[in-house]
Image (cartoon, rainbow, N blue to C red):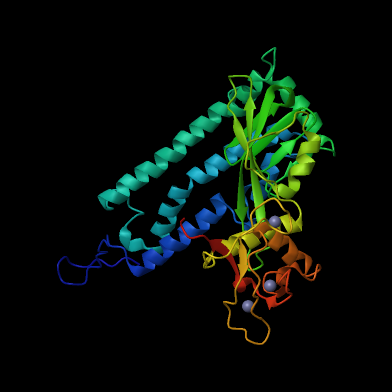
Amino acid sequence: MDFDYPEGDGFEIVMERDDGMSSYDMVFTIVFCLISFCIIAPPEEFVAAGLTIQNILDRFLGSETINFINYHMKRISITLVCHSSVPLIYYLMMAWINPFKLLHKPWEMHLYWKIYLMFSLSLLILVLILVRYWHSNEFENHPVAKKLRFLSETRDWKSVASSVNVEFRRIDKFTCGPRIPGRRVIVTDSWVMKTSTYNLDIAHQNDINLTLTESQIHSMGIDSLRELQLLIIDVKPSNSNLKSFKLHLKSTDYKDLNDKLQKPVRMTQNVVIHQTISDRFLSTFRQEILSHDKYEVPNNIEVDQCLGCMRSRANIKILKACDDADNCAQCFCRPMWCLDCMGKWWASRQDQSRTDTWLSSKCPCPTCRAPCCILDIHLLKHHPE
Ligand SMILES: [Zn+2]
Ligand SMILES: [Zn+2]
Ligand SMILES: [Zn+2]
C-alpha cells in the first residue's frame, strides 16, 4: 500500500542517517574481526572442527595426494580470494544489520563509507584479476609454477611438478606441522617443501644448505615439563633464483626429519636439541632456580669443585626459604654441587612415572639428606674480592 502524505504535515517517514558507531555496531565489529581472524589464521580448535578454508572449499581443490602441486596452486589462489573478500563482507553485513547507515544506498552514505566501499571493492577486483592471470594458460603464470621452472634444467615446470606429485604419494615421506595443508613441512626423497598461507617453498635436496639456526621453548600450560622446543632450520638453495626459507618443527620430529634428509644439518653453536624428558626437566629446573634469591657466600667459606661432575665449580646452596616447617629441614652443608648435577639428582629422586609432580615434590640434600623443596635451592653470589 502506498500512502501519499501531503508534504510537511509531520507524517513523513524520513530515515535519518546514522553515522556514529553505536555499541551494537561495536559489538558486531569486534565479533566480525574475531571470526575473520579465526578463519585467516585458524587456531587448533578451528582446525579440529574442520573450519578452515581448505576444508570448506575442499571439492574445488581436488586431492592433495593425487595432484599435490595443482592442489596447492588452487589452495593459494582460493585463500587469497577469500581473505581479500573479508572487507566487502563486513560492509554487506553492516548494511544488513544497521539500515540507518544507508549503506544500501551508496550515493547517500557518509564519505568514509564511500571510501571504504571503494577500497574493499577494488581490493577484491584486483585479486580476482591477479588470480585469473595466474590460472590462465594452465597455471603458466602462477608463482608456484615460476618457482618450479627454476628447478628444471629445461625450464619445464610440469616435469618438476609431476616428480613432486609422484614422490608426495609415497608413504615414506616426512611431514610435520598442523593438520591443515597450509602450514606443513614436507620432505620427500628429492624435495624439501614448506607450505604456508600464500606460498609453497620448495628446493631440491641436492641443491641446499641446511642450518639449524634457532630454538625456541614454549611452555604448555601448568605442567612446565610439557614444554615444547621449536627448531628453526634455514634452507638455503644454491640456485640464486630461489629464495631461502625456514622450516619450523618440534624437536621431537627432528630425528625423523634428519633420517629423510640426504645432507647433514649444520648446527650453529649454542643450540641444544631437547629430546629426553630429563633434558627438558633440567632446563625448567635451571630457569626456576635462576628466579630465586641468591645466597651470599660468607668470606670464610671455600667453594670447591662440584662433587657430582668434578668439572664445574659448585654453585648451589640449600637454604630453607619456604614456610613448610613439617616437611623441609635446614641443611647445613657448605656449597658442594653445581646446578646441573643438582637438577639431575633431583630428577633421579622423583617418581619417574609422574613428571608433572617433579618440580613440586621434595628432594633430600645429596650430602646430609635433609629434605628440601625447590624454593630452598639457591645459586651462589660471591663477594667482590
Ligand atoms: Zn656438577
Ligand atoms: Zn645438606
Ligand atoms: Zn622447603
Q: Residue at x 60, y 77 (%)?
A: 320
Q: In the rendering, at what x and y percent does residue 124 appear?
A: 46, 40
As drawn, which residue projects farthest toward the front? Answer: 300
For residue 138, above or below residue 354 = above
Left or right of 224: which side holds 66?
right
As drawn, which residue projects farthest toward the left? Answer: 8
Left or right of 166: which side holds 142?
left
Residue toward you, 382 or 203: 382
For the N terminus, the image quarter is bottom left
Q: Residue at x 66, y 71 (%)?
A: 333
Q: How many marks?
A: 0
Q: In the rendering, at what x and y percent does residue 109 appear?
A: 28, 53
Q: Quadrant of ligand 3?
A: bottom right
Q: Is residue 248 visible?
A: yes
Q: Residue at x 69, y 36 (%)?
A: 71
As drawn, which residue projects farthest toward the right? Answer: 171
Residue toward you, 335 or 325: 335
Q: In the rendering, at what x and y percent does residue 272 appear?
A: 67, 45
Q: In the rendering, at what x and y percent does residue 371 appear?
A: 70, 77
Left or right of 161: which side holds 270?
left
For residue 113, above or below residue 257 = below
The quadrant holding residue 174 is top right
Residue toward you, 84 or 281: 281
As drawn, which residue projects farthest toward the bottom? Answer: 326
Q: Is residue 65 visible?
A: no
The quadrant holding residue 375 is bottom right
